[in-house]
Structure formats: structure tokens, C-alpha cells
Image (cartoon, rainbow, N blue to C red):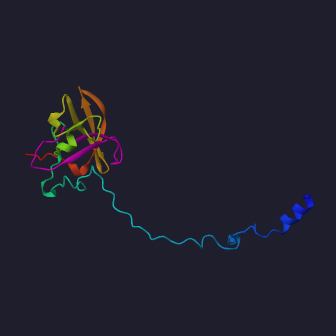
Amino acid sequence: MTICMLAMSCSNTNNKTVKNKLPDTSKTDSVSNIQQTESIPPTKAHKPDTIRNVEAMQMNEDAFQKAIISLQDSSLVVYGNIREDYRIFGYEKPDTNSRKLIFFSVFTTDVKGNPYRCPYGAYYSTTDMINSEIKYLSNAGNFIKANFIKDKAVLSPIYILKDWVKFEEKN
């Protein structure tokens, strides 16, 4: 009986196994089969902390205010003038990608709550800093180097872009 069953199952053609034939990729160059995708041009990254790229706070270049360095004692002063635009960062290194230490701005959204988390704070003017001052030291490439002083102790040097600083004029 076992032989009969075995014979019947071998001759049963209803249970055919179908094999899908896949293309032989070993003979083709896989690089040539890759379709090139359309190149997407890089878009200009908007930096929210630069003067000309904030759409909500577009600054008027005719009314820029700069920090003033005193010729008498090297103090750096930022006046809080709402009729002039300014956004001045003090950086940890002479590099705009380095840590932001202090910030001066005419815009409330820049100052209120210190949104850039500057350890020395965000202010409208240098007169808003309590028991603190900034003293110019030297030039450092595209930056000026200054000391941040609090309670008569130098905490650290800060770097400010030269574009945002000018020396006071002699009278």
C-alpha cells in the first residue's frame, strides 16, 4: 500500500511548484542600473540671529546703530535707541558659530526672556547691565576683543563683529 501511495503522489501533476525566474544581476554593472535623481540646488540657510535675515524683524540699513568704544577709557557702550536698529552679539571666540555670550538688540522678542540663552544676558543697552561693563582690548580679525567685567572682576573675553562697533569721534 505504501508503494501505491508513493506512485500516486509522484504522478500527481496538480501540485506543481512554480519558480519565479529572477534576472541574473551578477553579469550586469549595478552602477549603470541606478537612475540619477534630479539635483536639488542648496537653499540659502537663514540664520535667525543675523541682521538681514529675520523676516519678522527686517532691519533698515539706513538706521543701523553700532556700539561705541570710548577713546577715554575703552568702554563699549550700546545706546538703547528705538529709532535705530541693532542686533549685536558677543561671542566666546572670534567666530559667529561659537557660543553667544551676550546680546544687545532693539527688538523685544530678542531681549525678553533671553531667547538665545546668552549666559551674560540679553539687553536693550549697556546701561541695563547691573554692575557690569565691557572694555575694548584689541582687534581680532573681523572681530574686536573685549573683556566682560562684572562686579569689577573680568569674567571672560568676548568677541564682537567689527561691523557693529565704531570708535567714538574726537571732539
Q: Position of residue 82 (x, y in %)?
A: 10, 46
Q: Residue furthest left?
A: 171
Q: Which span of residues is magenta-colored?
A: 75-103
Q: Identify which residue is drawn at 19% across, 33% down.
A: 129
Q: Position of residue 137 (x, y in %)?
A: 27, 39
Q: Quadrant of residue 14?
A: bottom right
Task: Judge from the rendering whether residue 77 lies leftward or rightward of residue 27; answer left or right.
Answer: left
Is 107 drawn above or below residue 46 in the view shown? above
Residue 85 drawn in magenta: yes
Give the camera-side residue of 169 and 21: 21
Q: Identify which residue is drawn at 87% across, 61% down.
A: 5
Is 141 drawn above or below residue 92 in the view shown? below
Give the camera-side residue of 23 and 156: 23
Is 69 drawn above or below residue 45 in the view shown? above
Task: Judge from the rendering whether residue 86 lies leftward or rightward of residue 12; answer left or right.
Answer: left
Tell me the quadrant of the picture where the N terminus can be found: bottom right
Residue 114 drawn in magenta: no
Q: Identify which residue is drawn at 90% across, 62% down.
A: 4
Give the camera-side residue of 117 and 129: 117
Task: Judge from the rendering whether residue 139 lies leftward or rightward of residue 73; answer left or right.
Answer: right
Magenta-colored segment: predominant secondary structure: loop
Q: Position of residue 26 (x, y in %)?
A: 70, 70
Q: Position of residue 62 (x, y in %)?
A: 13, 57
Give the camera-side residue of 28 and 11: 11
Q: Quadrant of residue 46?
A: bottom left
